[in-house]
Image (cartoon, grey):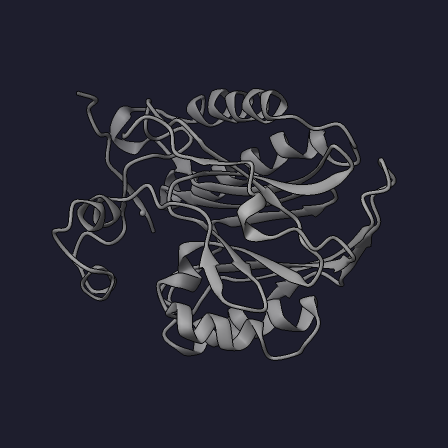
Amino acid sequence: MTQTAAVTWTPDIMSAGVTLVAAGSTHEGAVRRHNEDAWLVSPPVYVVADGMGGHAAGDVASRLVIEAFEELAGRDDVTAPDIERVLESSRTAVSALATSPVTAPGSTVVAAVYVVERGRGYWLLVNIGDSRAYLLTPERLEQVSHDHSLVQEMIDAGEIDEREARVHPDRHVITRAIGAVDDAAADFTLMPARGGTRLLLCSDGLTGELDDERIERVLRGGASAAVTAARLVAAAVEAGGHDNVTAIVIDVIGSDILSHADTLGHGRSDPEVDTVPQARSHA
């Protein structure tokens, strides 16, 4: 297992009034011989990328995604167009790895960038694939990203429920990825970064082994971000560890008490796995 000591950052922009404390942890799991996950904790940018392709350079693909996002580290003026540009750069770099359409490597990505709008702090979230973002508030744990996967489409259509999805034979098939699927639009979400909340970014190696109830218990365990990230990863490995596992935990400390109703935007792009990419046609 590898992990980082907590990185503490106080934004020096427009008196946002918060401090962010973040840490990440990763493990190759109990089955895989190498780790295709990659991650970044470099304020104001936090990213998890899950490579796919095995010996077809899945680990290289995820690393290229992280390297693209590194250009945003240390900035206090990141915008959605900046992230779109970084995503396009990563698409180009990962696509160049392909030797044939059959062996094309790819990567998921879930990223959180701290931004300030009108003097208040917000999370600008982006995701492609089935790596997830969760928000823990005093009231509940909420998945704030939307999986781009075959089983999620089946859930949305009312064909299966969440419990059936966890054991479905196609649960590792994703419908969007960087590099492996040509049409891979990102979802963007802008939501308040409230003091007293905790954000989790993770690869599907975590959510494939632990249900939301177990994840919430660990997140509410009272431990630091670094200890909590390590505990989540260790719990997933102990539960089976069938995949690489990565978790980043970010604590928002401060006086910003925006309500959930103040979310500015949460939208998915046009509809339209160990991750198996599957291209989806657009109607």
Q: Is residue 99 left or right of residue 166?
A: right
Q: Position of residue 78 (x, y in %)?
A: 70, 28
- Residue drawn at x 48%, y 20% is 92
Image quarter where the C terminus lies is: top left
Q: Where is residue 128 in the image (x, y as percent from the top left)?
A: 42, 37
Q: Is residue 272 left or right of residue 62?
A: left
Image quarter where the N terminus lies is: bottom right
Q: Nearer the viewer, residue 234 or 266?
A: 266
Residue 259 in sight in this render: yes
Q: Is residue 71 left or right of residue 240?
A: right
Q: In this view, does 242 lie to the left or right of 262?
A: left
Tell me if residue 230 comes above or below residue 143 in the rendering.
below
Q: Say which quarter of the image contains residue 97.
A: top left
Tell how many labels: 0
Residue 32 in sight in this render: no
Question: Going by the picture, which residue comes out furthest to the left?
Answer: 159
Tell me if residue 250 comes above or below residue 29 in the rendering.
above
Q: Nearer the viewer, residue 161 or 137?
A: 137
Q: Where is residue 17 in the image (x, y as percent from the top left)?
A: 83, 49
- Residue drawn at x 53%, y 26% is 87
